[in-house]
Image: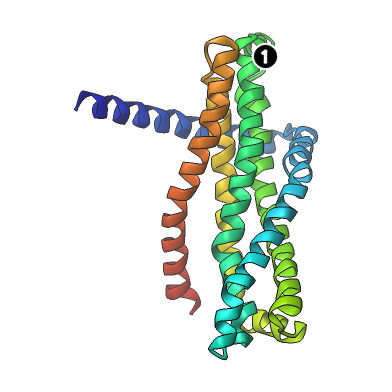
Amino acid sequence: MNLIRDYAGKFIDSMGRMSILFMQTLYWTFHNLKSGKFDFKNLIEQMSRIGVDSLLMVVITGVSTGAVLVVQIGYQFAQMGAQSYVGGVVSLAMARELAPILTAIVVAGRVGSSIAAEIGTMKITEQIDALETLATNPVDYLVVPRFWGCTIMLFMLTIFTNVVGMIGGSIVAVYQIGLTFTSFVDSILYMLLIQDLMGGLVKASIFGAIIAVIGCYKGFSTVGGAEGVGKSTTDAVVVSIMMILAVNYFLTVGINNFNVAYLQ
């Protein structure tokens, strides 16, 4: 019981501190926008590091996922005479779940670890203390551009994942399953609705915010030299992926309920 109580206490404490960091990030964002001091140059730099440098991994993830989905369901649908639905079913699976989830996991592994390692190294080398000495708020300077860079680029990368996933799926559908490209595209246009795409993109943006907050929090919490940086980096990736998978359920339920209540 004491072990469970300790883990529960640490979890609640961590969630509280991450919530405070999130609120501080929003405060500095609106404060800087209102005062005209928002650092767009730093934001664009972070967007480039997070988004552009992750494109190759996103391409591989999207193409392989779309292709595998078509292989898995294409033959079964063809046997049932439902091959005209292959494109639509694949596009729905990609748009609603697989594109935002897989893109977020890939980015968490690459970007979340990088954020934690960078800020963690600054913490143990006392560079963050130097920022405070220079009257620069660490949350404003370090967290805000990474938070919005990650949030915006997850949105954009998920769009890209959907596109390349459909391209990969269409190639397999035409050359391996024997479907026509026209039937594949028509199925997508018939079954995929704008709310399906937007629901997945909303998820992606929230996942990006989660990755950034956890990565920054783990970086600021780093202690113990190089070993501590390694631990923070690992924790950032593991906790981010766990949070993405857990939050995804609640987002799915909420988005589905919203679609049923207001859009259908």
| Position of residue 234 measured from the top left corner of the image (x, y, whole percent) | 54, 29
Q: Nearer the viewer, residue 163 or 22?
A: 163
The image quarter in which residue 202 lies: bottom right
- Please identify the quadrant where the N terminus is shown: top left
| Position of residue 31 measured from the top left corner of the image (x, y, whole percent) | 63, 34
Residue ID at (63%, 24%): 117
Q: Nearer the viewer, residue 83 or 158?
A: 83
Residue ID at (65%, 49%): 154
The image quarter in which residue 196 lies: bottom right
| Position of residue 58 measured from the top left corner of the image (x, y, whole percent) | 71, 52
The residue that disc 1 covers is 131
Q: Nearer the viewer, residue 70 or 9?
A: 70
Q: Nearer the viewer, residue 253 or 129?
A: 253
Count of marks overlaid on the render: 1
Residue ID at (68%, 48%): 152
Residue ID at (60%, 83%): 85
Q: Is residue 108 visible?
A: yes
As shown in the figure, which amino acid type bears the numbered disc 1? Answer: Leu
Mark 1 packing: few (<14 Cα in 10 Å), some, or many (20+)? few
Q: In the image, 93: left or right of 149?
A: left
Secondary structure beneath label 1:
helix
The colour scheme used to paint the residues is: rainbow
Q: Is residue 24 visible?
A: no
| Position of residue 103 measured from the top left corner of the image (x, y, whole percent) | 63, 51
Q: Residue furthest bottom?
A: 81
User: Is residue 143 shown above or below 72?
Assistant: above
